[in-house]
Amino acid sequence: MTRVAMDQDTENKVLVIKNMDSGYLVAGEQVTLEDVPYGATEPIAEDELMVQLLYATYDLFKRDLASSSADATELRGRKPVETMSIAKVIKSNNEHFQEGDMVIARLPVQQYALIKADDVTNLKLLENPYEFDDIRLFLSVLGVPGLLAFSSLYEIGRPKKGETILIVGASDEIGQLVGQMARLEGLKVFGSVESDEKLDFLITELGFDGGFNYAKESPYEALPRLIPDGIDIYYDNLSWMSRLNIGGLDTHFDLLGSRHLNAAFASMRRYGRIMFYGTIAEQTVLDPIIGMFLHNTVLKRLTIRGFALSDPSFGKKWGKLHMERMQQWVKEEKLKIPTFEITGMEHAAKAFVEAFYSSENTHTHTILAVT
């Protein structure tokens, strides 16, 4: 998508994945920084832009892997990391962009980049009608993660006041946003997480009605205890991790997703909605329960649908309403968006690894502040 000038009068580093299928990711080994040439004074061609990266987030990078037809084993060899970022236009030869404009796009995690004319259409001006001081919001609740959470809940979940939602894997950014939106719609909200600290955060800080630590309690025991009257919406935010063949994560989350699903079937109410991000657990894990799966689907008139970030109906149908409602909720301080920020390009590899292995902190939206 980008190229750089040929002289090297300014430092310019890029984040690179050397090999992503070699086990547990380590900053400085599989994920490293490399120098690339950049010329601050070199003129740019017609319709091109020069941008300076300000913020990058990696949280959707792993979801891209999960929802693709391939898995992380394809990321062998050197590849620059590209992810959703906010950048500032520092030089423009394009009539649609001016110096000083803020843009949001999928960009390399690179301090300075020249955007070729053919790729300028991928950039979007950052529109901030409420004049939020924290533009990082446009990489979270007002960006792609917020759109994914919003559109999936309303398109598939169709929440109604008084219903009950269970969010499986509720501790990440998507799970937290779905839970808070459901609460604003008058639903009872429950979540499963991997630690007592995260469970306490969901209940005391985000207003969840309850939940359980799946590292300590089986969903077969937890769901009848927590939700004796049944579940209307089952939001699976965990099984997508089974697509990530990184450091043994695939098997671990595969089994967890299957156990939650098995337990939830007994608790689903009639006309309940079951939704999965990306993929459900591997077929070999589901084989023993496929009969019960189909039987309960018919018996309880359940709707079951998978979804992914690339679903065309999501952005086109819900994009405008997402921005209107989310900006209003943020302005009214009805949503909490915990952010874990790492400052400095020198820490880019550390921030990347943190996005994959963040079980020890509740601030699951990892942002790299480049400058």
Image (tube, grey):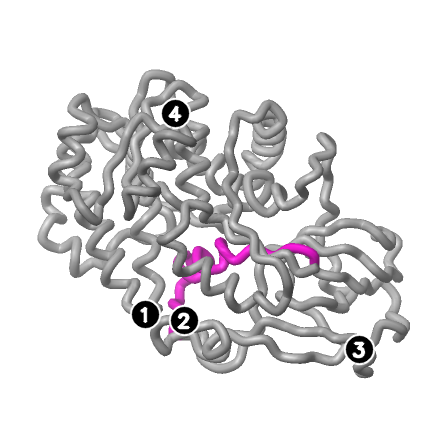
- Residue wearing tag 2: 25
- Residue wearing tag 1: 247
Q: Nearer the viewer, mark 1 or mark 4?
A: 1
Question: CA separation, marks 4 and 3?
Answer: 51 Å
- Residue wearing tag 3: 5
Indicate left or right for 201 with 93 as reference: left
Above or below residue 118? Residue 278 is above
Residue 60, magenta (yes or no): yes
Disc 2 to disc 1: CB gap under 8 Å:
yes
The quadrant where residue 252 appears: bottom left
Tell me which residue sits at (30%, 63%) in the image.
249
| Pointer 2 or 4: first along the chain | 2
Question: CA separation, marks 2 and 3?
Answer: 31 Å
- Which residues make up the magenta segment? 54-73
Indicate the amino acid at tag 1.
Answer: Gly
Question: CA separation, marks 2 and 4?
Answer: 38 Å
Indicate left or right for 360 with 85 as reference: left
Above or below residue 347? Residue 104 is above
- Residue wearing tag 4: 159
Count the marks.
4
The quadrant the C terminus occupies is bottom right
